[in-house]
Structure formats: structure tokens, C-alpha cells
Amino acid sequence: MKCRRCREPAIIDLRRHNAAFCKDCFWRHCHEQVKRAIHDFDMIERGERVLVAVSGGKDSLALWHILHELGYAAEGLYLGLGIGDYSDESGRFARDFATRFGLVLHEVDLPGDVGFDIPDGSRAARRAPCSACGLSKRHLFNQAATQLGFDVVATGHNLDDEAAVLFGNTLRWDAEYLGRQYPVLPAAEGFAKKVKPLVRLGEREMAAYCVTQRIDYILDECPMAVGNRHLHYKELLNRLEDSSPGAKAAFLFHFFDKAHQHFADAVVEERDALEACTVCGSPTPAGECAFCRLQARATRSDAIPVSIGRRPV
Ligand code: AMP
Ligand code: FES
Ligand code: ZN
């Protein structure tokens, strides 16, 4: 197997691109895919300050690395979610990366700074852990970006993540979620711009990027995400991809090109109608925002603590 670009021995083959690459050309390929996503979707203007949400996993650390190498002013944000050993370990990978490359990492510790962790939040709100977690992450990413003066929040969602989410949204024809599913959500009153620069790169490519660049990342999946339906959708799409290479990217990018516009107007109208949360000031349809309601419920003194993983939380 030879590299498509330089004919040296290849280290990875990408059936979707009908190509194989050596280490250096693969590095270039990843950078080009990110540059192209940023350009095609107008994600980041030169001079804008970027806050990269880093979980300690392969995608977000690779994203931070690539943005840094492309010359963007990118600082990191790590949220300690209070999910036992998993959170302790993922925080260590994020901090070690920042130290190694001399980059600034901001941190929010949910139990210490917000008063609850994800296991408590999920119990108190009677929501699946990933739902309470997603709500908290979206709120805290935006709050940190607006308070710290960042223009853009970048997350490490990759092609596989986005195709699986699209699959779920399409199975239910969930117009609201389909309207919000796009690699860039523009800034608005109270909202920083949100971007997903890895949307053209798959999970396997991101793992290979980290291995070839010697970036250490947490291998474990979140223990609370076991059985999550997106993992199931990913498996289904991988089976489809095995028999039809490129099907996953076609599904996602044809949605962006041909269908997303039909769902987008509802999101703009929804955003225009938002008011400031009466507690924290974040945009919300009315009264207290969903995060403040979750926080109030989860920090009530009668909330019962639960155990996750090996460490009682
Ligand atoms: P997930 O929702 O776990 O699939 O993660 C999607 C993206 O959200 C990651 O690529 C990161 O950019 C971001 N993210 C997830 N967990 C954290 C965390 N604990 N702290 C900061 N960012 C995170
Ligand atoms: Fe959010 Fe696991 S990272 S529930
Ligand atoms: Zn609020």
C-alpha cells in the first residue's frame, strides 16, 4: 500500500477517499480537511478568539492541536463533570496536553463551581445522564465563552458523531433538532458562535492522528454513556459504510447541502424570541433557563447521592 501523494509506504488507508497516506501526507490530509470545513462553512475569521472544548478524548485534543498548528488563537476549556475516575483521568489528559504545548486551559469543576455533578443532576432531573450532561455542557461552554470574551466555541464532534446524530434526528423527523444540526451556529445576542471543524474527519482518522502525533488521550468511554442510542446508530452506520464506503459522508453532507435549509428558519425565529434567564442571564424562552432549573433541583439538600464507577460520588 503506497501513499497517494508521495508513493512512500502508507500507514493508513481511507476507503471513503479511495486513498492511502504516509504519516506526513496523512497529517496534511487532516489539516486540509479542517481548513476546508472552516472555509466552506465560514467557521472562524482570522483574529477571532477560539475556545476549544476539550474532554481529554482524541477528537477534541486533535482539534486543539490542529487549530494551534494552523495559527488560530485557541485556548482550551475543560469541564470536570464529576463522573468518578473517568473525570479525574480525562482532566489529566487535557492538562498534560496544555502543559506540553504551552497552551492556556480554562477549567470549570461542576461539583466545586456549580454545586452538582452529572450523576446527581441526572437523578434530580429524572433525565438520562447524557441528556443532563449535554444540557450542562452547552450552557457552560456558552457561559464560559461569553464571560471570557471568546468569539467562537469549537467542539470535537467528528463526521461519525454528526452522522449518528443526524440518523437519530431523521428517524424521528425532529424538525427542531434538524434545524440546529449544522457545523456552524452563528453568534447571536447572548450566544457565542459554535463550530465543529472536524466534521469532515471520521473517528478512525482522529485516533490515527493522535497516535501519529504522539498525543495521549483517554481511551475509556464515559461509563454513563453505555447503552446510549447514538452508539447504536454509529454501529449501524459503520455496517453501512463497510459495504458502501462514503455512504456516511454522503448522508451527512447531502443533508447540509440540500435539506438543512428547510429546517433552519424555525431555529432563527426561536432564537429571536429568547429572553434573559431571570437567574443567570443566559438566553431562554422565558423565566429560568433549563440549566438553572436543573441546578436548583440537583443542589436541593434532599437529593440522594449515587455511586458511579469505582469512586463514590
Ligand atoms: P461528547 O458529547 O462527549 O460526544 O463530546 C463532544 C465534544 O464536546 C467533545 O469533542 C468536546 O469538544 C466537548 N466535550 C465533551 N466533554 C467535555 C468536557 N468534559 N469538557 C470540555 N469539553 C467537552
Ligand atoms: Fe456526559 Fe458521559 S460525558 S454523560
Ligand atoms: Zn439560567
Image (cartoon, helix red, strand yellow):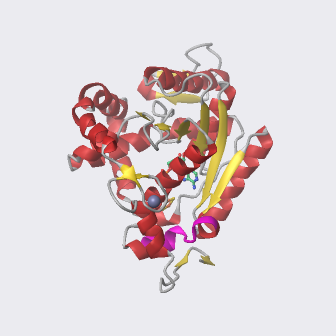
Q: In the picture, residue 289 is in which quadrant?
A: bottom left
Q: Could you say which is closer to the camera, residue 142 or residue 170?
A: 142
| Residue 167 falls left or right of residue 14 | left
Q: Residue at x 58, y 19 (%)?
A: 2
Rendered location of residue 266, percent (x, y): 24, 40
Q: Nearer the viewer, residue 215 or 16?
A: 215
Residue 35 position within the rendered picture, expressed as x and y whole percent measured from the top left: 54, 22
Rendered residue at 53%/61% (across/down): 222
Find the magenta span and give its range.
113-123
Examine the structure image and report whether residue 99 is included in the region drawn in magenta. no
On the rendered image, what quadrant is the N terminus found in? top right
Where's residue 112, x and y in %? 64, 68
The quarter of the image holding the C terminus is bottom right
Q: Could you tell me residue 306's position as x and y percent?
A: 51, 80
When the figure is inspected, residue 53 is found, relative to residue 264, above or below; the finding is below
- Residue that sits furthest to the top in the current view: 6
Which residue is more in the foreground, 264 or 63? 264
Question: Can residue 239 be seen in the rendering of this structure?
Answer: no
Magenta stretch: dominant secondary structure: helix
Image-based side of 36 in relation to 5, left or right: left
